[in-house]
Image (cartoon, helix red, strand yellow):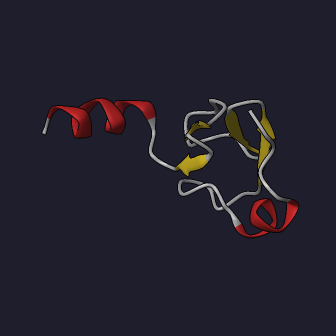
Amino acid sequence: MANLPARLLDVLRCPVTGAELTQDGAVLTSSSPGPDGETLTYGLNEGIPVLLRAELLDGAART
């Protein structure tokens, strides 16, 4: 998995906290914890950031 361009990471933000995202392989991680103190992570699908939480993705896949 190639890294996202630095310019793209500069503008992407966590949709829950508004914090910066960092890339670790195929996962983007919010630099601030979520409302419950959990680490928020988001996946990449063929190099495209998917900024939906896992539980929302599961529901979207069923519709």
Q: Residue at x 76, y 57 (%)?
A: 20
Q: Position of residue 4 (x, y in %)?
A: 77, 51
Q: Give the camera-side residue of 48 and 18.
A: 48
**Is residue 39 rendered to the left or right of residue 25?**
left
Check the image and report above or below for 53 versus 4. Answer: above
**Is residue 27 rendered to the left or right of residue 10?**
left
**Is residue 62 rendered to the left or right of residue 18?**
left
Q: Residue at x 81, y 66 (%)?
A: 10
Q: Position of residue 2 (x, y in %)?
A: 78, 39
Q: Quadrant of residue 58?
A: top left
Check the image and report above or below for 17 versus 27. Answer: below
Check the image and report above or below for 34 versus 51. Answer: above
Q: Which quadrant is the N terminus positioned in?
A: top right
How many labels, in total? 0
Q: Position of residue 19 (x, y in %)?
A: 72, 57
Q: Give the camera-side residue of 21 and 26.
A: 26
Q: Which quadrant is the C terminus positioned in?
A: top left
Q: Give the camera-side residue of 32 and 12.
A: 12
